[in-house]
């Protein structure tokens, strides 16, 4: 009966038992895991990275994402709608929307069309001509934004 050195196998076992096969089996399993995780790019084992929210592959995912690539849904963006008086006229301002996660231009177009007013995108948010604060709050809540009116 031959004994294997402890340093080479990590355990003392007879050559006739399965104890000597354990290290080689363990190495082959670990190699398979490493290959499937690290080296599968471009092989038949490659799996696309999926979105944690919708489960679709990232290339097909339409979930809104912030600048870091994290999913940022409308319910996670605290929009504030305020009205300001400029030169005797009211302007409604929507702030607090993430420009990377929200298509601000499409949202502005939708708001302008539904409110029949003019508006533009500024560095701090969306500006619309006229006092539309209450209607915008209702519309944004219907879209899933947890917004609040602010200001007077």
Image (spheres, rainbow, N blue to C red):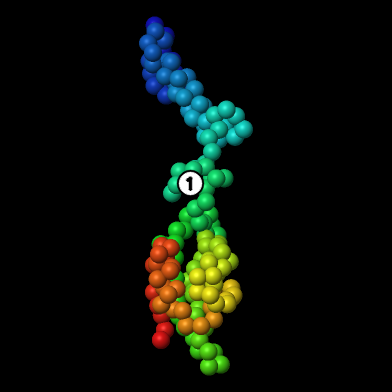
For the point 53% across and 35% down, which residue is it? Answer: 47
Above or below, comparing residue 54 to residue 108 in the picture: above
Q: Nearer the viewer, residue 32 or 137?
A: 137
Q: Is residue 104 visible?
A: no
Mark 1 surroundings within 10 Å by alpha-carbon count, few (fewer than 14), some (14 through 19), many (20 or more): some
Taking the spot 41% from the left edge, 73% from the top edge, the residue there is 137
The residue that mark 1 highlights is 51
Picture residue at 54% right of the left edge, 38% below the top: 48
At 51% from the left and 83% from the top, the residue drawn is 130
Residue 109 sits above or below residue 11 on the image:
below
Marks counted in the figure total: 1
Decide if residue 17 is on the left or right side of residue 101. Answer: left
Residue 18 in the image, given as x and y percentages of width and height: 39, 13
Q: Is residue 48 visible?
A: yes
Secondary structure under the numbered disc 1 in the rendered image: loop
- Where, quadrant-wise, is the N terminus in this rendering? top left
- The residue furthest top is 1
Find residue 121 and report its image quarter. Answer: bottom right
In the image as oriented, which residue stretches furthest toward the right?
42
Where residue 16 sits in the image (x, y, percent)?
A: 39, 8
**Is residue 42 left or right of 36 when viewed as pictured?**
right
- Classify 123 as above or below 42: below
Q: Residue 112 in the image: x percent, y percent? A: 54, 72
> In the image, is residue 48 above or below residue 75?
above
Q: Quadrant of the C terminus?
A: bottom left
């Amino acid at each position: 009966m031959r004994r294997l050195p402890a340093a080479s196998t990590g355990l003392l076992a007879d050559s006739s038992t399965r104890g000597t096969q354990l290290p080689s089996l363990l190495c082959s399993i670990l190699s398979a895991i490493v290959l499937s995780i690290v080296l599968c790019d471009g092989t038949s084992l490659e799996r696309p990275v999926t979105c944690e929210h919708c489960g679709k592959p990232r290339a097909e995912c339409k979930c809104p994402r912030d600048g870091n690539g994290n999913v940022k849904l409308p319910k996670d963006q605290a929009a504030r709608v305020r009205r300001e008086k400029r030169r005797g006229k009211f302007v409604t301002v929507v702030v607090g929307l993430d420009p990377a996660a929200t298509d601000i231009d499409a949202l502005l177009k939708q708001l302008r069309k539904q409110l029949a007013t003019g508006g533009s995108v500024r560095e701090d948010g969306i500006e619309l001509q006229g006092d539309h604060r209450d209607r915008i709050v209702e519309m944004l809540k219907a879209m899933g934004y947890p917004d609040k009116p602010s200001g007077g």
